[in-house]
Amino acid sequence: MVIKISYRLLSVLILGTALASCGSDADRKIEQQPKPVSSKPAITLIETPAFNQDSAYAYIQKQVDFGPRVPNTKAHEECAAWLEMKLASFGLVASTQKGEVTAYNDNKLRIFNVMGRYRPELTDRILLCAHWDTRPYADRDTKDLNKPIDGANDGGSGVGVLLEIARLISADSNGPNIGVDIVFFDAEDYGKPESSMVGKANDSWCLGSQYWAKNIPIKNYNPRYGILLDMVGASNAIFPKEAASMHYAPEVMNNVWAIAHAMGHKDYFSNINGNPITDDHIYLNTIAGIPTIDIIHYEMGRADFGSFHHTHADNMSIIDANTLKVVGDVVTQVIYQE
């Protein structure tokens, strides 16, 4: 997601503090913790297929080419159909959960949660997810505030990385020995603007994941854990250990970060403890009961998701193939380590 820092407060008690959302500002300082000393043995990295960052970049460009993917628009419907088609073209069992949700302003939104399943016959599974919709307002910009944004990073980047992962694991004849479910959540970014006097902010974000968590379209679905990707394409991105992830799924987060560090990516996957953020993983944890972490870009010193966040600057010019490569390689490695 992309906007100036502003914190949407969620009425979920985590670590004795309110959750700060992907779509709001915060003044509070983030406490920097010393890096813990680990006594665990070094991780032996399994060989994996190569993640193609150019392919991931092209998938982001394709999404942006549809135009802003705002619910109830033609671009939104066309992109949803393309996402399902693309997952199916990789050999995954693809489907779309259709529903209707009510936005903070009482607008009824048609939503499409798009899902692809790798080796659906396996009961031992993990969940990978991202949101694919875009912000209907550039409410952190200084001009055209009421116009939707491209959402290249906030919406497009996580989807681009996961599409490339779907392609490479399906093309690998010696693929991972675990089932993988990829879900693209809708209506994540339709939350109440801070300046709006209409509606309530609580739970106004992440409407697609809330709907999915309450209506999981797979019987007895019980994956080991989930990994959410949000805003994973900007240059020099830093991913702190987001606090809600550490509360709900510390073992998952520590394992992912340990693998990232073993791969030499300490500069991206920081050991600094971050703020709790309202994102799709909150509802996967609290409603669906799936221990899920959030890999999300957050600039600690500025307490911001980036100067482009929820502005028209969130376009292809800020997408960095190097960042896509790092995130894609790490998530691919996590899958194969299973």
Image: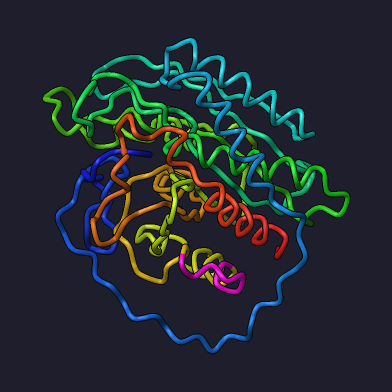
Q: Which residues are magenta?
A: 260-267
In this view of the protein, which residue sits in the foreground, 111 or 27? 27
Residue located at (13% from left, 30% from top): 195
In this rendering, is residue 143 above or below 246? Answer: above
In this rendering, is residue 51 above or below 8? Answer: below
Residue located at (24% from left, 55% from top): 303
In this view of the protein, which residue sits in the foreground, 331 or 97? 331
Instruction: Please indicate whether residue 146 sits to the left or right of residue 236 in the image.
Output: left
In this rendering, is residue 258 above or below 280? Answer: below
Instruction: Please indicate whether residue 238 sits to the left or right of residue 17 in the image.
Output: right
Seen from this angle, which residue lies furthest front? 317
Number of dots carrying numbers: 0
Q: Quadrant of residue 141?
A: top left
Seen from this angle, which residue lies furthest left? 197
Quadrant in which the N terminus is drawn: top left
Measuring from the top left, give residue 50's x and y in whole percent: 73, 54
Instruction: Please indicate whether residue 204 sits to the left or right of residue 68 in the image.
Output: left
Q: Main secondary structure of the magenta part?
A: loop
Measuring from the top left, give residue 71's x and y in whole percent: 42, 18
Quadrant in which the C terminus is drawn: bottom right
- Colour theme: rainbow
Measuring from the top left, give residue 241's x and y in whole percent: 40, 64
Measuring from the top left, give residue 35's x and y in whole percent: 39, 80
Seen from this angle, which residue lies furthest bottom? 39
Residue located at (77% from left, 55% from top): 49
Q: Is residue 35 rendered magenta in the image?
A: no
Seen from this angle, which residue lies furthest top? 74
Residue located at (34% from left, 54% from top): 298
In this rendering, is residue 291 above or below 190? Answer: below
Q: Is residue 261 rendered magenta in the image?
A: yes
